[in-house]
Amino acid sequence: MRRMAFLIALVLVVSACTGGDADDRAGTSGDGTAAPGDGGSLVDQVPTPGGDGAQRAAWTFLVYLIGDTDLEPFAVQDLLEMASATGDADVNIVALVDRHPEYTDAGVLNLGDWEDTKLLEVHEGELIEVSGGTELNLGSPDALAGFLEAGIGAYPADHYALVFWNHGAGWPGMGPDETDGLDILDLADISQGLETGLAAAGVDSIDLIGFDACLMATYEVASVVAPHADYMLASQELEPGHGWNYESLGIFATDDDVTSDELGRAIIDGFAAQAEAFGTGSDITLSLLDLSGVEAFSTALSEVTGRFGEDPAGLATALTGARRGLLGFGRNPDPALDSNHVDLGGLLDNLAAVGGPELSTAAANALSALQTMVVANTTGPATRQASGLSIYFPELEDHFRQGYLFLTGDPQWANTLSAFFQAGQELPQDRRATFVEQPEATVQPVFFFDDDGLNVFGPLSEFSIGSVIEATMFVGVVDPDSDAQLFYAEEWMDIETEPVTVTDTGGEVIVDGSPGVFAIHDNSYLELSDGQDTAIAYYALNLDQDTGFGLVDIPLTYLAPGSEEPEEILLSVVVDLESGEIVEEDFYTVDPSGTYGGLTADPQGLIFPELLLVENGEAQWVPTTDVGLFADLPNLQYALIQHEPGTQLYVDMTVWDYGGNSDSTVLLPVVP
């Protein structure tokens, strides 16, 4: 690991996404009560009937804009972008826009602020209000169905596109509508709304469905929308707050015969260009999927997953090897808030490499079908390995959300995960994750220091190494007052499945011929400063030597002025490993349900860095300052500070196998 000893002003890059609550059900609020708001009266409000009497356009571009969240300022900006791009194009741009009473009071062009839901025609430099004055629950499938029926009926066209706009969580859905019981559109809602709305409009399917939201480019989402559209446009990773650049719709003014493929590619190009201009492009993703390939891919995937019935233990071991080190999306140091989305192409590619001949062939065929389905894709340098589609794959059964078992769409992967975890429960004792500690031998947990910092290696039994799915090094110090451990860093460890020889800088062999886990820590801790006060902060580090970037996640809490309720937030940082420079910082709010959103912080608010305190086996997050740091985020500074010589560290290496069993070993190195 390269040292990152620096002090740099943070650049606030507001981003939008959700982790979602997988067990939230359609039509309910967070506490399970019926969500308020009228979901289905929109059709009656549209005064202009469609049908044969309406002039037919080449395209109708429908935007289902759930702006009733902290993303409302970006909703205003996106409406302005839409209105700047139409010109004399043969296109209807129609938006159903729900706004919030608090986040911004800005007007949009000729319209002032509003708090309810309006159906708008978007024209060059002007918005025409078709209907308004009613608060609709856009987390309701009825509202979605009504919008489709009204939009297609009143604005007939040769081609139709539908864009969902808000926070996104992937398979749990998207939303919420904050003033209607925090209702979300889960995948069942989306499926129901599409089916009902398109049937009422007399249309079998539409040309393009897009999700201007986080984490929605997943196999689960694609399976649900495939019967209703030809193409899908979505992001695997968290989207920056600015989202898509709707000036890309200018393609309609320059091309009289735009295809779905051309429209999708234009939006991808516009998104990438805007992200580069805003400095948010280092870890973006956006992919265009040909949904006609979903059936062929599902069939190919079933050839992989179907092998669980033939050899459950063998396939579980292969999936374990393929899962290690995969590019993940929507990460969080708290496993309960991690999305557990992994790159599907990477998973299949790894399976093709680690499986036996038949499994390798099946995985390679599925990967080929996936690559055929992904017709266009943009990534940032830190996400360049993204294939265009993700899948839900928690490493441990304890992190699995039971709501996944009730998804609409192809159930085969849910069944595969169930079989995977069942195989883990049946894992023999001698194959469970186990460190090898042999005093008086050269096979035992060891450490040494060199120019890169602290090197640690934990040998594992040759029988258990194939079952290990995750390995993490936690670094901290011992609290002298309580003997509790205060952890300030966690880092992924490399899993070496073949026997290795480890030597220190003097050439002495200290581990000879053992598989195990390895990591390097640079002997530093993270310190944040507002220019007046400083505080130590926890960070989770994931290095990707293939891309040359490190991904750092820092948990914090935020207290708004006058509030007594602290809010969980996350700082995500992308680091260039070659130069040690930070190339991007993104801030997210994290609510108790796991929903992520762009942070809007008052500079007079306070942020509280945290450390992970472990005492008597119990872990909890604790603030490292009583006074807090001012949340003037653009001017917040942070640095990695080198430990003083003589500092004794507390290093916990923990490994987990796919059965959820774990083993830990502790090292107590002293910084030279």
Image (spheres, rainbow, N blue to C red):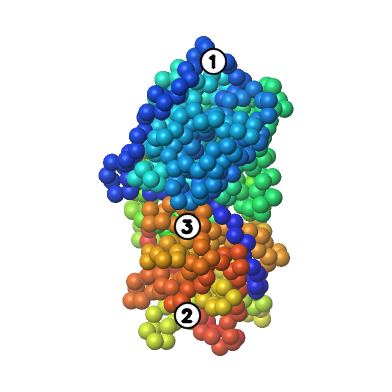
Sort mark 1 into few (<14), some (14-19) or many (20+) by Cα contacts within 10 Å.
some
Q: Residue furthest top?
A: 52
In the rendered image, which quarter is residue 505 located in?
A: bottom right
Kind of residue indicated by mark 3 = Thr
Q: Nearer the viewer, residue 458 or 160?
A: 160
Give x and y (percent) for residue 665: 44, 73
Q: Is residue 538 at all visible to an observer of this figure?
A: no
Q: What residue is shown at x 40% (from left), y 65% (from top)?
A: 563
Q: What residue is shown at x 33% (from left), y 48% (from top)?
A: 30
Give x and y (percent) for residue 541: 55, 64
Check disc 2 and report the residue beneath it. Answer: 477
Kind of residue indicated by mark 1 = Ala
Instruction: Classify 338 as above or below 130.
Output: below
The first of marks 2 and 1 along the sequence is 1
Q: What residue is shown at x 65% (from left), y 72% (from top)?
A: 7
Q: CA distance from mark 2 to mark 1?
A: 72 Å
Kind of residue indicated by mark 2 = Val
Instruction: Classify 600 as above or below 174.
Output: below
Q: CA distance from mark 3 to mark 1?
A: 45 Å
Sort mark 3 into few (<14), some (14-19) or many (20+) by Cα contacts within 10 Å.
many
In the rendered image, which quarter is residue 620 located in?
A: bottom left
Q: Nearer the viewer, residue 613 or 537?
A: 537
Give x and y (percent) for residue 575: 64, 62
The first of marks 3 and 1 along the sequence is 1
**Which numbered circle lies on residue 272?**
none
Check disc 3 and report the residue beneath it. Answer: 589
Secondary structure at numbered mark 1: loop
Q: CA distance from mark 2 to mark 3?
A: 28 Å
Check disc 1 and report the residue beneath it. Answer: 54
Marks 2 and 3 close (CB-CB < 8 Å): no
